Image (cartoon, helix red, strand yellow):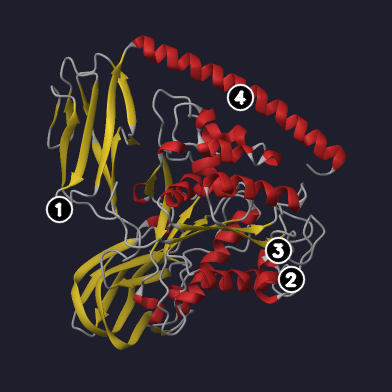
Amino acid sequence: MNKEKKEPRKVLVIVPHEDDEINVAGSVMCNFVRHNDEVYCVFTTNGDYSFWAATRMHEAVHSLTILGVQHILFLGYGDTGNFCKGGHVFYADKEAVTSPGGRKETYGIADFPDYAWQKRHRHSPYDRHHFKEDLHDLLLDIQADIIFCVDYDVHADHRACSVLFEETLGEILRRPGNAYQPAVFKGFAYCTSFGAPADFYQPNLRSVPCPDDGPDRIIGYSLYEWSKRVRFPVCAECRTMYMRHNTLYKALFEHKSQSAALHAVRIINGDTVFWQRRTDSLSYQADVTATSGLADRVRDFKLLDTTDIDTKKAIFHQYVWRPDETDPEKKLTFHWEQGQQITLIRFFANINDDGRIIKWRICFDSGYSAIYGPMPQHGRAFTISIPRQQDVHTCTVQILEWSGTTYGLAECEFFAEKMQKTMMQPFLKLKINDDFVYDYILPEKTEQCQLSVYMYPLKQAVTFTVREGPNSRVSDEGLVLFGVSDTVVRIRAAFITDATIYDEITLRRVSAGFFRKRSIWQHLEKWGLTWYLKKYRKYIHIRHKYLKKL
C-alpha cells in the first residue's frame, strides 16, 4: 500500500512468445492495470513455430484481456528454436533468414497487423537490423515510464530479445541530449517462473526461490545477484488459495496450444522477481576516449554479449573495454561539456573469470582521486559512494594492476543521485522466512513469530502496530507475541517518515484439522485440474495434428 500517484503511468512488457508475458510479468501487469495505469504488451514473434500465428496471437489477446491489458502489439518476427536450420534474426547481419514457419518478413493477422506495417506500411525482413529498427521505433513511440523485458533465458528467442533490447535501448540513451530514462526491469521466464518448483499447493503461498545451479543459469553473475533482486508483491486475485479462482491461472488457460495452465503451479508465487537496470548514468552523454581499446563499450548499456544464443550453456564473449598490452597508461577519459554532479559510481567488469582488474584509480577534475580494487568475480557490480562532486567536466579511470589476459570493463556508470528518479512508487512488504506474507496461517499453538520487512527502493525506519488482536503485541523488531485468546491478528508496518506507505497482513492461528481440510481440498483440486488439463492438452493437439489449427 502506498500513497496515491498523481498520474497514470505507461508500463511496457516485452517478451518473445505468446505465453511468456504471464511467465515474466503476469501479476505485475495485473497489478498495474488495477492501479489504472496504461499497460502495453509487445511480442517480438508470432509464436508460429508449430502452431498458426493466428492461433497464438488470439490466445494472447484472450489471455491479456483477462488481465485487463489495454494495448497489445506484435513485431511479427518468426518463432524459432535453438539451432534453427533457417538461421536466426540474431545472426542475420546481411541477409534475411527464413523462419521455421516459412516466412522471411514480418506479418500479422487482420485484427493485429505487425508493427512495421502499422508504422511504415511495409513489412520488415527477418534480419537483425530491422528487428532493432522496429524495437527502436516502438520504444520511442510508446515512451513507457516503466519497462519489463525478458532476460537471458536458455531459449534462443529469449536471448536474442534480451540482448537486442539492451543494444537498442543503449543507442537511445546515447542520443545527444536524450531525456528519455525509463525504469527498466529484466526478468526470467524460465528459472524464476516456468522452471521454478511446483509449490503452489502449500499451506501458505511461497515466494520465488533462488534457482538451482545449471549450465543455463546466470544467477550470481554480472547484475544478477540474488540479494540484489527487486521483488514485486502480488495482487489478491493472483494469489488465491485455490488455483481455479486465480486470475493468472485463468490467463494461462487461454494459451491452450501451449497447455500453459499445467505450469501454473510453478508460475504463481507470492512475489515476482526482476533485476533493475538504471538508465540515468551520466556516461551515456559523455564523450569517452581511451589510450587504447574500444572505449564506447563502457557506455552502451550492454553488460554482456554473445555470439552464440543456441548452446544450452550460457557462453559470453569478451565484450569489454580492454586496453592493449603495450599501452603504458591503460586509461579511459570521460568528458562532459556541462558540469556534472556525481555521488555514485558503479563498474561492471568481465563476466568471465579468466582475467581480473586488481587495482584502478579514479580522478575527477573537481580534485577527488582514489584507488580501488579488486573487481568482484563473475562481472558483478563494484559500487562506490563518494562525497558529492560538483561541476565535474572530466573523469579518468586508469587500470593500475591486473591478472590474466581478458580483464576489462563492461560498463562504467556515474550517477548524480543514489537512486534513479522514476515513476515507481516506494513500497514495503512484510515477510516470514523471506516469503512475502499476505493472509498467513500458523498452527494454533504458535506463541510468537518473527516478521521482517522488504523495502523498495530505499531502506527506511519502520514502525509496527497491531490493528486487530487486542491481547497481542509486536516489538519494534517485528516479533509478534500472540495473546492466548487471539486467533486473528492484523499487523501494520509503515514508514516512520511517511505513514501513508505501509503494508498490512493477517496472521491466523488455526487448528490441525483446518490444515488437513485445506490440504485435502487442495489435493483434490490439483488432481482434478491436472487430469482435466492433460486430457484437454491431448484434445487440442489432436485437433491441431489433423486440422492444422484450433
- Residue closest to the far top: 513
- Residue 215 visible in the snapshot: no
Q: Nearer the viewer, mark 3 or mark 2?
A: 3
Quadrant for the C terminus in the image: top right
The tag earlier along the polypeptide, 3 or 4, is 3
Left or right, 39 with reference to 539: left
Across and down, in percent, residue 234 comes to 41, 41
Going by the numbered disc 4, the residue's amino acid type is Leu
The tag earlier along the polypeptide, 3 or 1, is 3
Q: Nearer the viewer, residue 512 or 351?
A: 512
The tag earlier along the polypeptide, 4 or 1, is 1
Across and down, in percent, residue 54 comes to 74, 52
Tell me how far mark 1 sits from mark 2, CA to CA: 54 Å
Residue annotated with mark 1:
497
Determine which of the numbered discs, if any, sits on residue 123 in the image: 2
Residue annotated with mark 4:
529
Going by the numbered disc 2, the residue's amino acid type is His
Determine which of the numbered discs, if any, sits on residue 113 in the image: 3
